[in-house]
Image (spheres, rainbow, N blue to C red):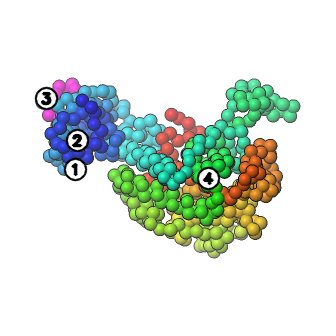
Amino acid sequence: MKRSSIAELLKSDKFLNEVKVKGWVRTFRSNRFIALNDGSTLNNIQCVVDFETFEESLLKRITTGAAIAVKGTLIESQGKGQTVEIQVSEIKILGDSDPEIYPIQPKHHSLEFLRENAHLRIRTNTFASVMRVRSTLSYAIHKYFTDNGFYNVHTPIITGSDAEGAGEMFTVTTLDLNNPKRNESGQIDFSEDFFGKNTNLTVSGQLEAETFAMALSKVYTFGPTFRAENSNTSRHLAEFWMIEPEVAFNDLMDNMDLAEDFIKYVIKYVLINCADDLAFLEQRLIQEDKSKPQNQRAEMALLEKLKFVVNNNFKRVSYTEAIEILIDSTPNKKKKFQYIIKEWGSDLQSEHERFLVEQHFKCPVILFDYPATIKAFYMRLNEDGKTVRAMDVLFPGIGEIVGGSQREERYDVLKAKMEANHIDEKELWWYLDTRKFGTAVHSGFGLGFERLVQFVTGMGNIRDVIPFPRTPQNAEF
Ligand code: 4AD
């Protein structure tokens, strides 16, 4: 007999059918009710056992965490809480789980404890819900771009250029680290290395994606990126996934429209397709909030917050306007910010971004036209000569979720900016070439996938929205 998924059976209205399911025991009550979960849905199926029909030795092995196969009849549930249940006729233990040592007991576990057991935490409702939402978001992203005429580009993970300037990089090498060959000045001689040059894990696929946009017009990447920053925060990972669309002939305003439309689409998609998981995650947050002081509780429940983002325009504010607001703000005047904003040109920290979004505008904000000095070399210089066509999308509770720009398409300006930033032309000759042959206005952005998953699921720590987080001092599993 073919195995049914629990999700399928819970939706079924065909009673008295013989069914077979396999899954992991969540609980076994009164030697009679097995709550079985196979991950296909948040919900367990109740399997009702007549204990007189089964050997006690078998019943004893139905413990939390054990893998079992159950055959029986699907009937209308006699109890509350579910519409169907299985009247069990046959049970097979597939894999025992010793209740004395199984770490995931049916009780509250802290997120910290579960992080240490990341190989098992997916068996909890919270993590299974988060990872189902993550998977659905990933699908929605591919669907959005495919439906809108974009092509997916697989940009390299190993890169020979470190000029993006997005962060510290991880070196990729096969050299003998105990005894690398050095040149006359004492530096490691990478000409002996696997690729004959110094290579790194990529921090972004943007520069390569730009070359594709100059032929296929609308492209996007969705891949892993690596940053060796020593940022131990709830929003930083050393390995994270980024979505980077790049569009020929789009200017900064088109880029903002795309970012807003795209984010709203994927959130709407999960609101429709992950309703159970999101409702569960909302309840989890409501419970978590009860233990917090009143002023730290969320102003909106999770679903309300997601619907708010979908139904309202993002506020578009220039950097200059934002700086004026920040200089005049109470936390700045009262020196409550860790970094006081004194003048135009200051880089914005997460505390400032969150003030703008959470206290001042109370909605997602797109900041644009930043000072050239605090942004990457490839962003298009404005006519004022001091700002660039950059944009960051800021979200409540998260801060920056998207970073993007209109790219500098003018060969001479780009070349001059590279020189000013000490970027070796020899390294990025191919990037400059795209400005030599058929250059055109183009724009793109990067969305941090885990930050989006954090926002949608309401999880406070980015380590809890990626299966196996990589952070400073941590690459377990
Ligand atoms: O602003 P960033 O550095 O932009 C770029 O890398 C551009 N090349 C993107 C582009 O224009 N194509 O990063 C983009 C986004 C950030 O807004 C943030 O959401 C996320 O990537 N991000 C991180 N997420 C998790 N951990 C980190 N260490 C992150 N650094 C950036």
- In this rendered view, identify the residue nearer to me: 91 or 99: 91
Q: Which residue is mark 4?
A: 217
Can you identify the residue that label 1 sits on?
81
Distance in Å between CA atoms under marks 1 and 4: 52 Å
> CA gap, disc 3 to disc 2?
18 Å
Occupied quadrant, residue 169 = top right
**N-terminal of the two: label 3 or label 1?**
3
At numbered mark 1, what does the secondary structure look like: helix, strand or loop?
A: loop
Q: Position of residue 35 (x, y in %)?
A: 26, 40
Q: Is residue 428 left or right of residue 28?
A: right
Q: Is residue 41 above or below residue 323?
A: above
Q: Name which residue type carries label 3.
A: Thr
Residue plotted at (74% across, 62% down): 381
The span from disc 3 to disc 1 (Cα, nearest Å) is 25 Å
In this rendering, position of residue 449 left or right of residue 419? left
Residue corresponding to mark 2: 46
Residue at 13%, 29% (x, y): give it: 53
Q: Main secondary structure of the magenta part?
A: helix
Are there few (<14), some (14-19), or many (20+) residues within 10 Å of tag 1?
few
The amino acid type of the residue labelled 1 equals Gly
- In what element is the residue under mark 4? loop
Q: Nearer the viewer, mark 1 or mark 4?
A: 4
- Tell which circle, 4 or 2, labels the residue nearer the N-terminal end: 2
Does the residue at mark 3 contact the one at mark 4 (Cβ under 8 Å)? no
Q: Farthest residue in the bottom direction?
A: 328
Q: Identify residue for label 3.
A: 53
The reply to whether callout 1 and callout 2 are in contact (CB within 8 Å) is: yes
Looking at the rendered image, the quarter that the N terminus falls into is: top left
Q: Which residues are magenta?
A: 49-58
Neighbour class for label 4 at 10 Å: few (<14), some, many (≥20)?
some
